[in-house]
Amino acid sequence: TFTPMLAIIITGFLTFTVVGPVMRTVGDGLADGLSWLYSTTGAFGLGVFGLFYSPIVITGLHQSFPAIETTLLADVARTGGSFIFPVASMANVAQGAAALAIMLLTKNKKQKSLATTAGVSAMLRITEPAIVGVNVKLKFPFICGMIAAGIASFVSGLFHVLAVAMGPASVIGVIFIAPRSIPSFMIGIV
């Protein structure tokens, strides 16, 4: 039975020749668009980016952002740091808070348990359980998290909050924020 091997060969070939190049182009376009959005619209652009960060996480395209951040951080004397990290932190915490709100409001013990672990996980950087396992299923918490992330990211942009290193985009990410931006970062997180 050569079916599994044939499936792997065909899938691998298509991934490397079609899917990979297409998704790289999409990621590059997203990166260019994001840089343009921030450089031309400032805080408003970051608010829009924060609003749509969680849906971007669902697609997996957020994995293209470290390449942009590395470029921004490589020339920190000129750029001042990364605008992406604070937005990602705001979005992750917002989705975590939405999951924790479900924990407080639901009577369903299974959902309460899932919302608790997913919410805490999101506060510490791993948002997929909160987004996919709790918030998207209920829709309203996901939308609330998106709106909160958009508002917090807008505030982050108003105060020019920048990160000077890469790390976990979460509450504990405060240690990667430029010292002058820490109070503004914490306002956005709250």
Image (tube, rainbow, N blue to C red):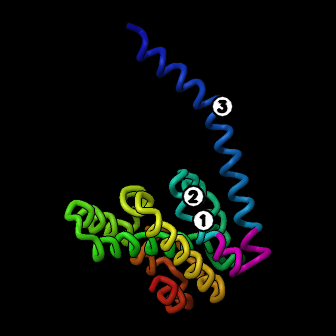
Between 162 and 101, the one nearer to me in the picture: 101
Q: Tags 3 and 1 in contact by the CB under 8 Å rule?
A: no
- Image spot of residue 30 (x, y percent): 69, 56
Residue 34, above or below 185 = above
Tag 1: amino acid: Phe
Disc 3 from disc 1: Cα separation: 26 Å
Image position of 36 (left or right of 87): right
Sequence-earlier tag: 3 or 1: 3
On the image, which quarter does residue 34 sit in?
A: bottom right
Q: Tags 3 and 2 in contact by the CB under 8 Å rule?
A: no
Which residue is drawn at the image coordinates 66% and 51% (left, top)?
27
- Image spot of residue 184 (x, y percent): 54, 90
Sequence-earlier tag: 3 or 2: 3
Q: Quadrant of the C terminus?
A: bottom left
Looking at this rendering, what residue extends furthest in the top direction? 1
Which region is colored magenta?
Answer: 37-48
Tag 3: amino acid: Val
Q: Callout 3: helix, strand or loop?
A: helix
Whether residue 160 can be seen here: yes
Image position of 10 (left or right of 26): left
Task: Quickly name the residue at label 1.
Answer: 52
Q: Main secondary structure of the magenta part?
A: helix
| For discs 3 and 1, the disc positioned in front in the rendered view | 1
Task: Quickly name the residue at label 3.
Answer: 18
Task: Quickly name the residue at label 2.
Answer: 56
Looking at this rendering, what residue extends furthest in the front direction? 107
Q: Tags 1 and 2 in contact by the CB under 8 Å rule?
A: yes
